[in-house]
Image: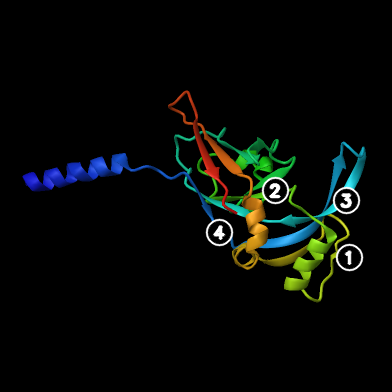
Amino acid sequence: MRNTIFILIALQVIISCKNTSYIEEITSERNVGITLRKYYDDEKNTVVTTYGIVIPIEFKLDINYKNIRKTTSFYYFRNNKSAGGNGNNYRIFNGDTNIPIFYEEKNWGYPYFPNSIYLVDDELNLTKDEAEAFIKKYRPTASAEEIKSDKDTVVLAPYSKFRKENPEFIEKLRKEPDTLTLRLSFKNKKEPKIIDKGIHW
């Protein structure tokens, strides 16, 4: 009996000491694509059109707890600098619904926190030659000329496959550190918990 009580107490201590991993980067199986992007160039004082590569950087979440507030949020830092607000230079999507979390305020919070999110950096641009090379590699019958607007996308391959087959391109993305910051707000604590996750691309 004494041994049983001791074992139960030990198990409780182990469980209470367990560190919850609220967020972990995973290699996404979502598709990489090429699209058209338009942005305002301050130096040229004009709207510039360029090709952009859509890469889903996915994170597994474990935040669906009663004590986590709806004000929990994410911030993206590109090259160690803030990339601005969600929806401006990048978008963060609900991995369960594929809807940007910016538009899910009513469905954001316990018990609706998603199992995953994925980030798309809207400033990963390509030259036309780079875009054509990727399209030729994965979609030899397609062409960059088919992309007429930001609503058109040529799908290349799942990111897990693209990542393995284009190591030089991925290394360029890793050259400067990028980070996704999770700001967790708890009902029983005044200060939020800040978790910085370096993006490994």
> In the figure, is residue 110 to the left or right of 12?
right
Specify which label sits upstream in the sequence, 3 or 2.
3
Question: Where residue 45 sits in the image (x, y, percent)?
Answer: 92, 37
Give the alpha-carbon distance from disc 4 to disc 3, as whole Å. Answer: 30 Å
Badge 1 amino acid? Glu
Specify which label sits upstream in the sequence, 2 or 1.
2
Question: Where residue 88 sits in the image (x, y, percent)?
Answer: 75, 40
Residue most extreme to the left: 1
**Rendered residue at 43%/45% (across/down):** 21
Figure colour scheme? rainbow
The image shows residue 136, relative to residue 119, as above or below, that is: below
Specify which label sits upstream in the sequence, 3 or 1.
3
Residue nearest the observer in this picture, 177 or 194? 177
Residue at the spot of label 1 = 145
Specify which label sits upstream in the sequence, 4 or 2.
4
Residue at the spot of label 3 = 49
Residue at the spot of label 4 = 27
Q: Characterize the local packing of mark 2: few (<14), some (14-19) or many (20 or more) Cα atoms within 10 angstroms.
A: many
